[in-house]
Amino acid sequence: MKKSKQLLLITALLFIWELPVIAQQPTDTTYIFRFVPNDDMFYVPWNGNDRSLHQLLNILEKNKKQLQAGQMYISVSSYAASANDILTSERMAYIRNNRIKSELITQRGLTEQMFVTDRAILSSYGKEKLRNVVVVTFPASVEKVAEIAGIEAARRVENYNKERSGKAERERLFIEQAAREKAEAERLAKEQAEREHLAAQEKARKQAETERLAAEREEKERAETERLAAEAAAKAKAHSLSLRANLLRWGTLTPDLGVEWRLNRHVGILVNGSYTSWTWNSNDHRYALWEIAPEARYYIGKEKRGYIGAIYKAGSFNYKLSEIGKQGNLMGGGLTGGYQLKLNKALNLDFSLALGCLHADYDKYIVIDGIRVRQGKETKNWWGPISAGVTLVWNVF
């Protein structure tokens, strides 16, 4: 009976001592950062993000020493992140958490070790059922620190909370008093051993759970990598056909049409053709031309819009724009390069320039009473630009 009364007295004293401790525990504060649905970028200022960020940065600056000492942690959790065509919800949540952490690290000189970060939380947040938000809680609770950063980190946080509330001194006095009671000391030792045993079991369970989740995450990432690789391979093997019209040629009243066959994402084979025939001033002036220009291209860049390649040209011409006319054949080739600007899903605008050599054999003539009179033969080689284009491209498939 005497021993039971002693136990009741000690329990009552402990409860009375704990009341001010509970009252003095540091309260946490949540800061909500909102994201545009299906987008991983963090926009400031947008939807109150600037106000929340300013408040959070100020409170972190005041507690920077405690963060550096591992006495406080910052909890980061993403809620109900919406996926897009590229990112899954889990991956979107992961990137959004990192956006917030990067902002805090950059502006306040923090480190990754000062954060405890949740995996993606698919449900909405709070009574308002907020979606596409990242919630920052500071300081993080001891339970959250223990769950993510581990038992040792949680103990540092708990000890710091104790020091702030004065609990450490009260516990020391309580232990000194309890030590004078041998039987009570033995009971406390046995309970402590039991708690440590349970803590070790809990730690082992959490470790096993962490390893299981890590294995699942690695498997998902491996499957995602294989899926993306398969999609990239499928794109690399895809064929396409497009029709072309060089607007520069059409601007000089020279109709120009072409076709391109893409063997894959990197290689394309083109054939362009031009034809025109004009006479005026009672047939005394003439402008006639036909050309065919096959071309091979190799597309470069992440989106395969830039390219380099080789071009060959052949054709004939008949120019008489002054007193002397020239009629003959041309042939040549060179290197080409350019860039395709995407207008929409079906149309591109192709800017191109080719440098090389053109060889021309032609007769010179004059017109007397409507009859062409030959004046001699010439041969010329031209080095420099041999082709230029601003071409409208229609992707057939």
Image (spheres, grey):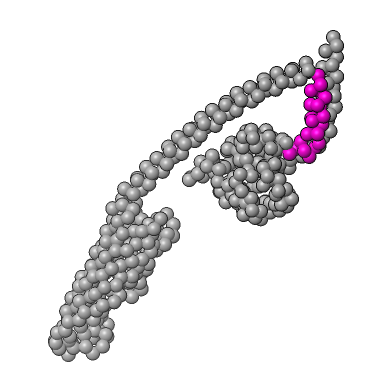
Say which residue appears at 67% left-offset and 42% top-offset.
Answer: 70
The residue nearer to you, when weighing 161 against 27, is: 161
The residue nearer to you, when weighing 30 against 143, is: 143
Say which residue appears at 38% left-offset and 64% top-offset.
Answer: 339
Looking at the image, residue 334 sits to the left or right of residue 344; the answer is left
Q: The magenta stretch spans which residues? A: 160-181
Say which residue appears at 27% left-offset and 82% top-offset.
Answer: 280
Check the image and name the residue furthest to the top.
1
Residue 190 quadrant: top right
Magenta part mainly helix, strand or loop?
helix
Compared with 386, 307 (above or below) is above
Residue 218 location, x and y as percent? 47, 36
Say which residue appears at 45% left-offset and 34% top-offset.
Answer: 219
The residue nearer to you, when weighing 286 against 53, is: 53
Q: The N terminus is located in which quarter?
A: top right
Based on the picture, tell me whether residue 177 belongs to the magenta stretch. Answer: yes
Looking at the image, residue 52 sits to the left or right of residue 270; the answer is right
Residue 293 quadrant: bottom left
The residue nearer to you, when weighing 205 against 389, is: 205
Residue 137 location, x and y as percent? 69, 42
Residue 279 location, x and y as percent? 25, 80
Looking at the image, residue 150 sits to the left or right of residue 313; the answer is right
Residue 372 seen by the camera: no
Instruction: Count the numbered circles shown.
Output: 0
Residue 173 location, x and y as percent? 82, 29
Based on the picture, tell me whether residue 171 belongs to the magenta stretch. Answer: yes
Residue 236 seen by the camera: yes
Compared with 202, 31 (above or below) is below
